[in-house]
Amino acid sequence: MEKAELKRFTKETITDVDALLARMDRIRSDGYAVSRSELDPDVMGIAAPIWGVHEGEVAGAVSVVGLVSHIPPQAERRIVAKVRLAAARISELNATAQG
């Protein structure tokens, strides 16, 4: 199988397909994603899925984006928790509305 070439934006950009697939597995396992300096050196993002009505279906996501220099590691953990909670609440409302 031919591997796709992934473009590097910063020194943190994942450009190895196997490493990217491993990262995706970890994100699925953790239930959220944190991207730090992968597209822009001073930008980070935290996201969690909004689940659809069918098993494993992702209907959307909740995300927060900020400057790396303004989000210390201890704040990152709190933001992850809040993003995951918001995504879970929206997922519950979505399930109830779809009934």
Image (cartoon, rainbow, N blue to C red):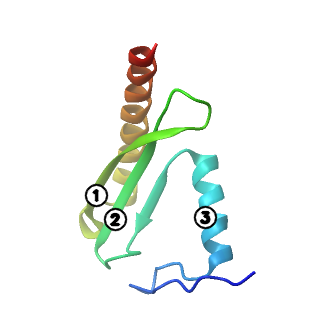
Q: Tell me the residue that label 2 is attached to.
A: 44
Disc 2, disc 1: CB below 8 Å?
Answer: yes
The 10 Å Cα crowd at callout 1, few under 14, some 14 to 19, many 20 or more, is: some
Which numbered disc covers residue 88?
none
Q: Tell me the residue that label 3 is attached to.
A: 23
- Look at label 3 and name its amino acid: Arg
Q: Cα distance, mark 2 to mark 1?
A: 6 Å
Task: Residue 21: tell me if it is visible.
Answer: yes
Residue 3 lies in what quarter of the image?
bottom right
Q: Which secondary structure, mark 3?
A: helix
Above or below residue 79? Residue 40 is below
The 10 Å Cα crowd at callout 2, few under 14, some 14 to 19, many 20 or more, is: many
Q: Which secondary structure, mark 1?
A: strand
Q: Nearer the viewer, residue 34 or 71?
A: 34
Above or below residue 3? Residue 87 is above
Which numbered disc covers residue 65?
1
| Image x and y of residue 70, in percent | 24, 63
Disc 1, disc 3: CB below 8 Å?
Answer: no
Above or below residue 2? Residue 48 is above
Residue 72 lies in what quarter of the image?
bottom left
| Quadrant of image for the N terminus | bottom right
3 sits left or right of 27 in the view: right
Q: Which secondary structure, mark 2?
A: strand
- Look at label 1 and name its amino acid: Val
